Amino acid sequence: MTQRLRGAMTAIALLGALGLTAWHATAREGDGKPATDRGITHASMVNADAQPGQWASYSRTWDEQRYSPLTQINDQTVGRLGLAWYDDLDTYRAVQATPIVVDGVLYNEMIFNVVTAYDAKTGRKLWTFDPKVGKEWARLACCGPSARGIAAWGNKIILATLDGRLIAIDRKTGKEIWTTQTFPPGQEYSITGAPRVYDGKVVIGNGGADYGSRGFVSAFDAETGKKLWKFYITPTDPARGPDGEASDSAMKIAQPTWYGKFWEAGAGGNAWDGFAYDPKLNLVYIGTGNGSPHMWHFRSEGKGDNLFLCSMVAVDATTGQYKWHYQMVPEDDWDFTCTQPIVLADIRIGGKLRQVAMQAPKNGFFYVIDRRTGQLISGKSYVSVNTWASHIDMKTGRPVLQPGAHNTTTPHLMSPSWMAAHSWFPMSFSPKTGLAYFAAQEQGSIYARAEDGKYKYVKGRNNTGQDYTSQPELRKKLMEQAVATEKAYLLAWNPATQREAWRVPYPAPGSGGVLTTAGNLLVQATVNKTVAIYRADNGQKLWEMNVDQGGGAGAITYMIDGEQYIAINVGWNGSPAYTLKQPFRIATAKLLVFKLDAKGVTLPPMKAQAEQAWLPTERVPADVARRGAALYGESCNRCHGDNATGGVRDLRKMSKQAHDDFLDIVLNGARAEKGMPGFGGQLTEAQAKDIHGYLITRAQEDW
């Protein structure tokens, strides 16, 4: 009997003595063989490092570290990396999902929640499941029909659809097992985040704060789809009384921090991403979102902290009962969200081993929090410019706001802004280096609240409460300043000391999530339209491949039959980068899979683009351009940039054909295949014409 086999059998005996009989070791450690006869279980997830060849959850492990113990591909061998196989996903929209790998099968999700199972070794398609999400959801969600991932439990794959369904499908056949609706139809919700399954409970949040909704997180039985608990993030009209949900005790804490008729626009707080789970403490950690509307003045009469906006909230995994919270952004006035990745780790700080939860949210501060109690251990800005807050007061745990941080009717430049010092792109923590890694950026944006009486909640539209048109000359000057000071970089951060370890600069924001491995590697899709691999200890670039695409998704790594693979979705859209050299062209989105010494597989060249920029000469009336500017700010700037400056598609430089077809494109989705959804249910023809007039004016001003 070999030493490795004896070790595996000893592990089986030991686990059996502990009552963990559902877990079945294999003789070949990490080769991706079945973790259990019953698929993924609580025991197999708790002991995930015993089978490092699997990637069975969004971030591999429940602590969300996105770290793999695999070492075959390492800082010495990575130069031999080649493309093993790929799948062209045939879309220009953002494909943001993290694939999962269970028992040699790779499961991937693309836009509109279509899930495909592949032989993870060869790329052969095994089955595809299409939940048939209505194409109108491309505009009902904040940033398009993206989906960030799926979950596995038992012999089921579980997905959460854009239109609010939670669906379990058989992982071997792709056939539906059960489905349940997670939010009420007809309300301003959507789901883009990945579901998590903790000890048989599917936990899922939702988006919709921008459009006017009341955020909540809910849990469902993974075997049946039955609702187990629901936790509201913000309160509602106190005259209605308690909700009768797990969050009732928490709402007693939150209610006094709100003023006026805040519930009329939902209040927001939606947890659309950012979860973690500690099985020993039995706590689920929730990252919460921004307010609805964005402007504190209109949302809560400019008063109160507005709990639990932009907070980390811990709840009991079994009951959903509130345990503690820490609010990063009291009085949220800036569309900040704290839905960015939450990562759990045990770190030695000041000579003491601390159980921590870490987060680098939009506001530019890196937080280290005691995950047992919610106590703030440290908070430090990770960006060089922070016009929101100067520091965190460690006595109170509150940010010390910079003078003029709150919005008035006078336009001012804020950095970080709604575009985030760090967005949802997955963060990683390496226990080997003790460093956290994430894509950081410095992007200013112009803020000004609407004058009293000028803002009105409109169902189904981005309700910011902002004014996008006042003082145009000042806005132009501020926009020039924002463009001139824009920065982006891959950041390695030491959470124990709250200091930067190293950085890799990029020409513009837009580089994606990261993966680290025990092989001293860090993998990232970059705004340079490449997949790049760096040394995790010092940031030295070791390998890079042009893929004609950027991407926000994080990579994964897995092992089958003794061979290690790296897989990543590349597909980039939205997330404006003002300094991109135009035209910024991308290929169709793809799932890419690499391994050592792979040869003979190459990507096709990008399709030729014949359209040339064209400048209209017609004079647009000032009132048309003014109305169009306001509508653009409510419906278009998320993908095309503030003040029509930048974005993946610079609308100041449209072709003549695009100008001629503008109404068909905007209202009917004539270029949906290129990533531009139709807004016919949200904008009238007159409003679309006003937006077109504004864009013609912007082209004439800047070109």
Image (cartoon, rainbow, N blue to C red):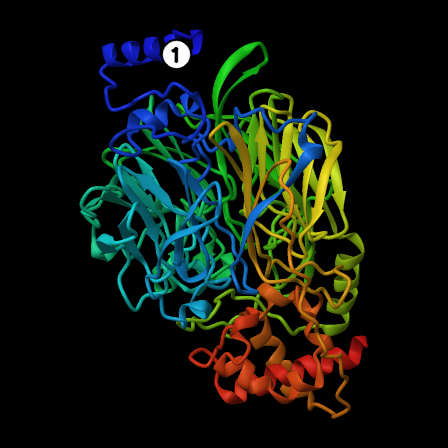
Label 1 belongs to which residue? Answer: 5
20 or 391, which is in the foreground? 20
Where on the picture, by quarter, is residue 49? top left
- Seen at 39% across and 58% down, the residue is 113
| Residue lying furthest bottom | 618
Location of residue 288 with respect to 345 vertically, above or below: below
Residue depicted at x 50% and y 72%? 455
Is residue 180 something one can see in this rendering?
A: yes
Q: Amino acid at mark 1?
A: Leu
Image point (38%, 6%), residue name: 1
For residue 221, which quarter of the picture? Answer: top left
Position of 82 compared to 371: left or right? right
Left or right, 70 with reference to 445: left
* 15, 563: nearer the viewer: 563
Q: Where does the image place residue 4, in percent across and percent down from the top left?
A: 43, 11
Q: Residues within 10 Å of mark 1 (few under 14, many from 20)?
A: some
Q: Is residue 638 left or right of residue 532?
A: left
**Quarter placement of the C terminus:** bottom right
Q: Left or right: where does residue 37 sit relative to residue 386?
A: left
Work out whether 237 lies above or below 252.
below
- Residue 457 vs 275, above or below: the answer is below
